[in-house]
Image: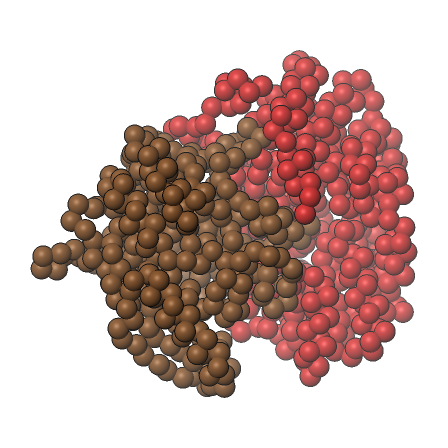
Amino acid sequence: MKYINEFRAPLFAQELAKAIYKEVNTERHYRLMEFCGGHTHAIYRYGLKDLLPDNVEFIHGPGCPVCVLPASRIDMAIKMQTESDAILCTYGDLMRVPASNGHSLLKAKASGADIRMVYSPFDALKISQQETNRQVIFFAIGFETTTPPTAVIIKKAQSLGLKNFSVFCNHVLTPAALEAILNPPDQILCVDGFIGPSHVSTIIGSDVYQPFATEYRKPIVISGFEPLDILQSILMLIKQLNEGSYSVENQYKRAVSGTGNNKAQKLVAEVFDVADRFSWRGLGELPRSALKISEHYGNFDAAERFPVKLEEGSEHKHCLCPSVIRGRNKPLDCKLFAKACTPENPLGACMVSSEGACAAYWSYGRFKDDSTEQLSSPRQRGIL
Amino acid sequence: MSTYHKYAPLDIKHGKVNMAHGSGGRISAQLIEHLFKKHLGNELLNQNNDQALFAVEGARMVMTTDSYVISPLFFPGGNIGSLAVHGTVNDLVMSGAKPLYLSAGFILEEGFPLQELEKIVISMAQAAEAACVKIVTGDTKVVERGKGDGVYINTSGVGIVPDELNLSGELAQLGDVIILSGCIGDHGIAVLSHRENLEFETAITSDSASLEGLVKLMVEKAPSIRCMRDPTRGGLACALNELAQQSGVGMSLQEKSIPIKAQVAAACELLGLDPLYIANEGKLVCICPAQNAEELVKAMRLHPLGAESQVIGSVIEDKRCFVQMETTLGGTRMVDWLAAEQLPRIC
């Protein structure tokens, strides 16, 4: 695999950091929301904050697919599995996401439920072909990036005439989440500009963000996940903010086009319809914010094959995840953080995936809280 | 009380064993602390090393045990048999010991082909010979089909520690230097590449090997070595966190000095895994006084298993016993315990 190191080159990173230092107006604050969990992860993993001026602040957005999945959907999946004794296949990230009452897929598995971790939806399809006497449910989650593969397996299952395969659809839509962030119920918005989605935009393109930038007067820079991508995007955002402009710019040109991946879009449109509403962890119920399997492929809809009642899931009442993903609070503001809630025992979803703001902060960043001895900053070491 | 016990301790009343209890991360450490050591603890067990050291007349001995439940049983660069010898020998030699004898307990599943069992046993014999140990006792049990996973092996081992050596995880001191014997992640990625449902093409082979020869050379060159550990399950990150915790110190690493093969890095990228947490079976990490480091690294590089030895960081003061790292970009991050199992990320 090529180009692992090219977009992580230290010298270029330092050049970009210097340019950012030069560009920032020290009189003001820059609150930049990285929409995707992939960005959050990269920012912490590479220690990017250390390369930036103090007045550039990251706000960790809602783009971590497991973080926005409400407990009630996990409850439903566990119920479907228990009542039907089907094989429930899911991505690894989802295993520890808190369901209601301290439950999770991992705990359900330890109690005997047949829950299997897969890397690709095709593995779930394979299992259904191997275990023909068992029902197999694929627990599909994710933003637009993971939707096309789910569409492909549903079509494949139909062409193979599989009777023991179905999909529990939890695919959500990025523009709806962006709008919810931009238009909070109390109209208090804590974000100046957006580091826009990376992989999602390869599918949906960069043009779809234009109406949001215009209406809400916020610059959006579509950014790759590599550290140099992120630094360059920050520079682009800061320039826009200094100029008072608010357009959509595409830093991730090597993968994202204006209109996106038309083939994938068609495929998704064929297999899915937009659901009237979907309940998000943290953002609440949002209209037209998720997909459901279309009538034509209804046979493969696990929610129809194994109907379970959607009960109100219970999130922990002190969990601040909802306001963390809106940028209102930092993980450290939460009473549960690092006490009752840790990656081993997550009470809120932001603590589960390393893409979640709380887990990223816990795993990579907490040594800065009150360190007795810290590595000196790159500025102190004379790198910048 | 050490820091990893403070957070969300084991819930014995309601909890059940889950896969994360075997991950080598913080949850594994909690299980050991709050269940096994709570009931079985004694001054030898509480040494908290990968082996226990005890005096017998005229000598100091070490003893260790380890169980092998790896899937798949055969992987590029080895199989469960060679691994069961290497793993236990390596736990012994991390104390500086000369390994002497091993026991081998087999739990076989009904229906397992004898031809495969023989392959496993032959590679155990070869591994034992290469490591200069003898397998002197054994046991075989068979469980019904479906109640095992082909073959499980437990090996225990004893060895003898030369008089002048005193290596233990709590002996790291401020200013000491951390040395790594080679590339990280080879074993874990080689095994993952052959795991069912996750097959991907790679030429990576496991680094599974006995470290007996390398350690012998190291302790001859630098008897002042404070401690060594083989970064197996949980990877380099967990091995260093264990040592930091035991010694009550912090550590500071330089990412750019940690060697990793391009193919391993690529596989980790693809799967969303951090190589710092991937298992190794033929590497060691060693902490020694700064003044001995250069000479020791030079000596290690002369051994085939230490050819890529590197100083990767140093021991610093930190009451919270955190391991931190300067990233290749010049920023800093923490290298925490593995939280539960390392789960692949979605995007």
**Within the image, what quadrant is residue A166 found in?**
bottom right
Q: Colour of chain A?
A: red
Q: Is A270 placed above or below A220 here?
A: below
**Within the image, what quadrant is residue B288 found in?**
top left
Residue at 50% x, 62% y: name it: B77
**In this orientation, which residue lies closer to the viewer: B309 or A6?**
B309
Q: Position of residue A88 (x, y in %)?
A: 65, 70
Quadrant (top left, top right, bottom left, bottom right) of the C terminus of chain A:
top right
A381 relative position to A219: left or right: left
Residue at 29% x, 64% y: name it: B133
Q: Position of residue B273 (x, y in %)?
A: 58, 50
Q: Is A380 placed above or below B115 here?
A: above
Residue at 78% x, 33% y: name it: A251
Residue at 59% x, 22% y: name it: A54
State the brown chain.
B
A165 relative position to B175: left or right: right
**In this orientation, which residue lies closer to the viewer: A347 or B183?**
B183
**In this orientation, which residue lies closer to the viewer: A142 or B254?**
B254
**Within the image, what quadrant is residue A13 found in?**
top right
